[in-house]
Amino acid sequence: MITSVQNAQVKNWAKLKMKKFRVKTGLFLAEGEHLVSEVHNSDWKIEEIIIQEGTNAPNFASEYPTIAVAENVFQHITDTKTPQGIAAIVKIVEPEWLDFSSVLLIDSIQDPGNLGTMIRTADAVGFDAVILGKHSVDLFNNKVIRSTQGSLFHIPVFQENLALKIPLLQKKGFTVWATSLENAQPYKEATVGNKMGLLVGNEGNGVDQSLIELADYNVNIPIHGKAESLNVSVAAGILMYHING
C-alpha cells in the first residue's frame, strides 16, 4: 500500500489534474465506481486501478494492475469532496471518423458541466459524434468527465478546427444549423437534412460570427416566458431531440 503523497507514482497521478500533463502522457484519471465501470465496458484502455484502503474493489478490477493507497493519498490525487475510493488511470483514445449522419459541433464552451452534459445528451439522443472546437474547456478535465456520466466512453468526441470542419461536412452532404439570437428563424421552421450538424456556442457570447456565416441555417428557440435565454446545454438538448425526431 502506498501511504505517502511524496511517492513518485502518486506525484505523477496528481499531475494529471493539469492539462499539460494529460497531453504529455496521453493519460487521464476517471474517478468513482460508475465511471471506472463505464471505461471497463467500453473500448477505452484502463492502465491501472487505484483503490483506497477499506474500499471493496469491483470484480473486474482483477483484470487490471491494481494499487492500494491510503485515504490521504487518494484524496490528494482526486478532486471530489467525498471520493468513492476507486479511480482508474485511462489512456486517451483518438476516435475514428466513420460514416456519421448527426454531429454536435461545440464552439468555445467554458463550463465543464455544460460540456459534459452536452456529450451525455448527444449520446442519449443517438447523435453519432461530437466535434469540439478550439477555445473550449479541456475534454479530459475531471469535472467534464464526471458530467458525461460515462458517455465520453461511448460516443466519439473529436477536437478540430470548426472553421475548416464545417465546410468539409457540407461537402459530404451535411446541413449545418447554428444557434443564434439574431437573424435566425424558429428551429421548427428550419429544414432538417438527411445529415445534420448542430452548432452551439459560448455561454455568454454564443457562436462565433465567422462560424455562423458558414452555417446553412441560423436557428433559435422561442422564449415564451421572461427568461432572457436558455442554458446552452438545455438548448442543445432541445434541438438534438428535434433533429433526431
Image: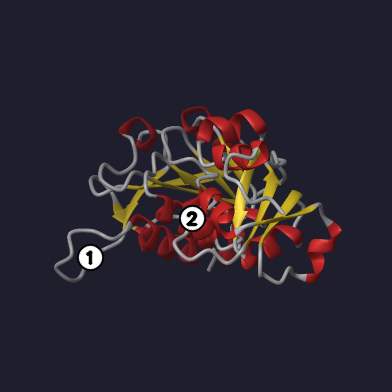
Q: Is residue 214 left or right of residue 100?
A: left
Where residue 74 sits, quadrant-wise, is bottom right
Q: Secondary structure at mark 1?
A: loop
Q: Residue at x 28, y 60 (%)?
A: 230
- Residue lying furthest left: 226
Q: Which x, y percent locates residue 107?
A: 41, 40
Q: Is residue 50 left or right of residue 82?
A: right
| Residue designated by label 2 | 116
Q: Which x, y percent locates residue 62?
A: 84, 62
Q: Earlier in the sequence, mark 2 or mark 1?
A: 2
Labels 2, 1: front one: 2
- Give above or below for 32 relative to 209: below
| Residue designated by label 1 | 223
Q: Residue at x 69, y 47 (%)?
A: 90
Locate the N terminus and report the quarter of the image it occupies: bottom right
The mark tally for this picture is 2
